[in-house]
Image (cartoon, grey):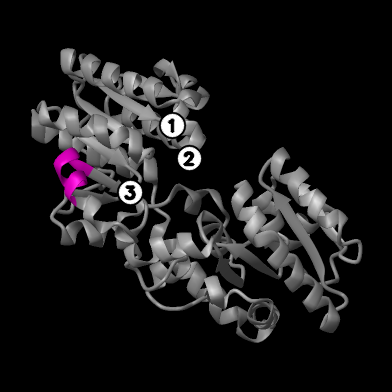
Amino acid sequence: MSVQSDNNVSAKADASGSVFAIVAGEASGDTLGADLIRALRRVYPNAQFEGVGGPKMIAEGFVSHYQMDRLSVMGLIEPLKRLPELLRMRREIVQRYKNTPPSAFIGIDSPDFNLGIEKALHSAGIKTVHYVSPSVWAWRQGRIKNIKRSVDLMLCLLPFEEAFYLEHAVPVAFVGHPLAGQIARQPNIAEARQRLGIDQDRPLLTLMPGSRSGEVQQMAELFLDVAAQLLLSHPQLQFVIPAANSDRHKQLEEMLATRPELQVKLIEQQSLLAMEAADAVLLTSGTTALEAMLLKKPMVVSYRMGNLTYKLVSPFIKTPYISIPNLLANEMLVPELIQEQATVENLTDAVLKALDGNTREQLELRFDQLHEQINLNSGDSAAAAIANLVTDQA
């Protein structure tokens, strides 16, 4: 069922004894968690919040029993090395809240860690919430059975996710995407270019080859080949690459050192500013495509992985599109060039069309409609849905 998540929750609950257990494992979850704590406190003024969180949650009075960065592991090897510690932490969290049940347990993202906790607590009769849907709607849809056995409420950031959970009879609330409220409806291109020191009068293409080492290794050389090809017909074109962090900056700097003919402005972080300054964006799939959509930027979405990995993964992908703008619109608003389609020739043609201003106005209008669709007050909407769950429990 779809759970009502309006912000008009009746009189503030008497929550003198209410404790909300929250586990966030990454910086993005810390941001969502801090916003949720503020919103829940407006409904439950005397509630206590504890579990695992970062500095933003702690600044809101949250008590973290573990350092959040102990959960922030990526890749294949690092999680295996840390597996005993992670399993111990999970056992301790489950035991803590079985012994002293909270009003609700809220796992924010980090599904590999949180869903196990949620399943154990749900089996013990404790209300469980998962905030930010895993991409179960896109691939490995069989995971929905485990989610159904683990959560009393799924909080989704995007409307097509809500539709998927309704189809599988999982209680769900669409609460909107926080980025939609953080990014202005109209970008300020001139100001963004001024802050980055970029020529106001020449067209600009922003290249976004990914945030992980493997992604950059796969995509950056391809994107730079496209940039070189574009310069043959558009010598005035400017390029900027915002590196995700210092390691990616160094990796990209080494690649650019072998291409002195390419005048690419390489910056560290500031990805939103780099996209806001752009006429178009060439990017790998992911949250970056959502950000480009919210900034009303024509884009080309591309992705490549190892052929063996792709053969193993592709049978499990169940959606007709991979980018969030196309999934939201349920149509091919922006080109997606994946795997063998991701050639220099194809990407160059697609970028030239994206730079063409003839279709820009219509695309910006559709992006603005999609922006409005997901621009809810996420924290208050999530708090209202959780309050309804806790009230039903009483």
Query: What number is the disc on residue 80?
Result: 1
Q: Is residue 94 above or below residue 169?
A: above
Distance from Cα at disc 3 to Cα at disc 2? 22 Å
Instruction: State the residue lying farthest toward the bottom.
Output: 358
Identify the residue under disc 2.
76
Label pair 2/1, CB-CB below 8 angstroms: yes
Please, what is the dominant secondary structure of the magenta stretch? helix
Where in the figure is residue 67, as x and y percent of width and height?
Answer: 47, 19
Neighbor class of circle 2 (other Cα within 10 Å; few <14, some 14-19, many 20+) is few
Residue 209 vs residue 79, the one in the foreground: 79
Q: Which amino acid does label 1 sit on?
A: Leu
Question: Is 85 on the left or on the right of 207, as rendered?
Answer: left
Q: In which quarter of the image is residue 347?
A: bottom right
Instruction: State the residue lying farthest toward the right.
Output: 260
Magenta part of the protein: which range?
Answer: 145-153
Q: What element carries label 3?
A: loop
Label pair 3/2, CB-CB below 8 angstroms: no
